[in-house]
Image (tube, rainbow, N blue to C red):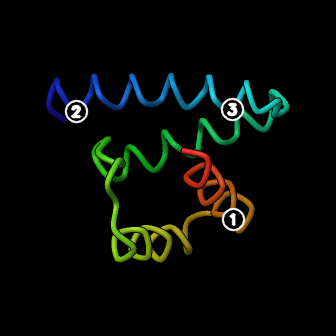
Amino acid sequence: MTPASDANFKHNYQTHLKHLRLKGLQPKTIDAYARAIRRVGAYFDYRIDDLSDAQLTDYFTSVLNEQSWSTIKQDLYGLKFY
């Protein structure tokens, strides 16, 4: 990860958390979506601002065997709110 991409991810991540709070989501939901963004971010080397459909399909296919369906759904909804 480059320093620029790290700073960009951290800034966008903090903004994402603020938006989730402003939407009135429960703290546990915010925590789950935040974990999802960190998980997806780690997979894509913290460059998640412009992911293609193909990249997302590859991601969800790869984690299908490692994660539960509830975790996969949290990742999906975390990304939808991002």
Instruction: Name the residue tied to disc 3.
Output: 20
Q: Residue 9 carries which label?
A: none
Where does the image place residue 50, in percent across and percent down from the top left?
31, 55
Where does the image place residue 25, in percent across and percent down from the top left?
81, 34
First in residue order: circle 2 vs circle 3? 2
Q: Do the residues labelled 2 and 3 touch (CB within 8 Å)?
A: no
Which quarter of the rendering shows the N terminus? top left
Quote the CA–CA distance across marks 1 and 2.
29 Å
Residue at horizontal 42%, vertical 30%? 12
Looking at the rendered structure, the number of numbered marks drawn on it comes to: 3
Q: Decide if residue 5 is on the left or right side of residue 14.
A: left
Q: Residues within 10 Å of mark 3 (few under 14, many from 20)?
A: many
Q: How crowded is mark 2: few (under 14 residues within 10 Å), some or many (20 or more)?
A: some
Residue at horizontal 28%, vertical 45%? 45
Amino acid type of the residue that numbered disc 1 sits on in the rendered structure: Ser
Q: Decide if residue 1 is on the left or right side of residue 50.
A: left
Q: What element carries label 3?
A: helix
Q: Is residue 8 above or below residue 68?
A: above
Amino acid type of the residue that numbered disc 2 sits on in the rendered structure: Ser
Quote the CA–CA distance across marks 3 and 1.
23 Å
Q: Is residue 79 above or below residue 4?
A: below
Q: Nearer the viewer, mark 3 or mark 1?
A: 3
Q: Where on the picture, by quarter, is residue 47?
A: top left
First in residue order: circle 3 vs circle 1? 3
Where does the image place residue 3, in percent across and percent down from the top left?
16, 24
Instruction: Name the residue tied to disc 2.
Output: 5
First in residue order: circle 1 vs circle 2? 2
Instruction: Name the residue tied to disc 1.
Output: 68
Amino acid type of the residue that numbered disc 3 sits on in the rendered structure: Leu
Where does the image place residue 14, in percent across and percent down from the top left?
50, 22
Quote the CA–CA distance across marks 2 and 3.
22 Å
Q: What element carries label 1?
A: loop
